[in-house]
Amino acid sequence: MKLYIADKTCSEAVQIIANELGLEPELIHFDVFGKSTSNGDDFTQLNPMQYVPLLVIDEEEHHPISETIVIISYLADQYPATGLIPLRGTLERVRYDQLLVFIATEIAQKHIPLMRKLMTEQGIAWTSGKIAAAYSILDDRLADGRAFLTGETMTVADAYLWATFWGDRSGVDISHLKNVASWKDRMDARPSVQKALSDEQRLVNAHRAALTAPAE
Ligand SMILES: N[C@@H](CCC(=O)N[C@@H](CS)C(=O)NCC(=O)O)C(=O)O
């Protein structure tokens, strides 16, 4: 299994879930700006949108799976006993999918044009307000003292939200949301999260070093 990742992006959610499950996909770095991959694969052939994360399960047939929430849900669905996601077909799962789509559309994707500095002043204000409101809804959810977004155990939604925490790059300030801040501290401490960060850093550094190494 191959997982294409990029530096400090939503692909960290997949790394975290793979780590929670004890899976060890081969990690490949995609340089979002330079467009090269750490193993020389032509990423455009694999994903014409050039987005990570991308999961290739079957090397022979190359059927890549894109879309963060689809990938993390798929991985967690393979191991129902872990409780990383509610069972498909249940109302609990419908509500859960609602939460994943909320994170994808109201938080993750709304950050991107802000981070890329592509917006007018009015657009920045409107989008930042929407993102802050979405985080505030999640802060309310955590206000009952639960440790994670849906209860006492970490699930795929927590991994996804953690991986789209881009306020330092988008300028969206949510420092007033104390429940989200405590939740973030809990997530930061998880071994699966720390491993995701160190694996990513190692791979990114190696890819950058290879790109700048003088040709022999
Ligand atoms: N619809 C995709 C979008 C993924 C996405 O936005 N990926 C970003 C990183 S978080 C990316 O690869 N951007 C590369 C680019 O903009 O060129 C998903 O939800 O997984």
Image (spheres, rainbow, N blue to C red):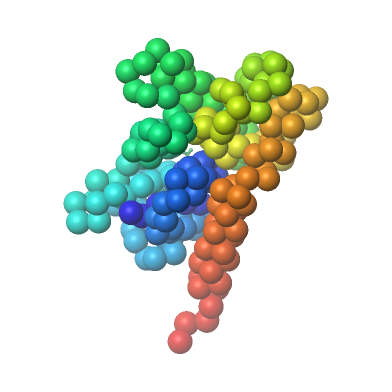
Left or right: 113 in relation to 96 = right
Question: Residue 173, can we see it?
Answer: no
Image coords of residue 156 (percent x, y): 49, 33
Image coords of residue 15 (percent x, y): 49, 48
Residue at 70% x, 16% y: name it.
Answer: 144
Instruction: Specify the farthest residue to the right.
Output: 176
Placement of the C terminus among the 4 image quadrants: bottom left
Q: Quadrant of residue 106?
A: top right
Residue at 42% x, 56% y: name it.
Answer: 24
Image coords of residue 162 (percent x, y): 60, 37
Residue at 72% x, 38% y: name it.
Answer: 185
Instruction: Specify the farthest residue to the top.
Output: 91
Q: Is residue 159 above or below residue 85?
A: below
Residue at 64% x, 17% y: name it.
Answer: 141
Image coords of residue 38 (percent x, y): 44, 64
Q: Quadrant of residue 123?
A: top right
Instruction: Specify the farthest residue to the front.
Output: 81
Left or right: 60 in relation to 16 = left
Q: Total label count?
A: 0
Placement of the N terminus among the 4 image quadrants: bottom left
Q: Is residue 203 above or below residue 187?
A: below
Question: Residue 59, can we see it?
Answer: yes
Instruction: Specify the farthest residue to the left.
Output: 61
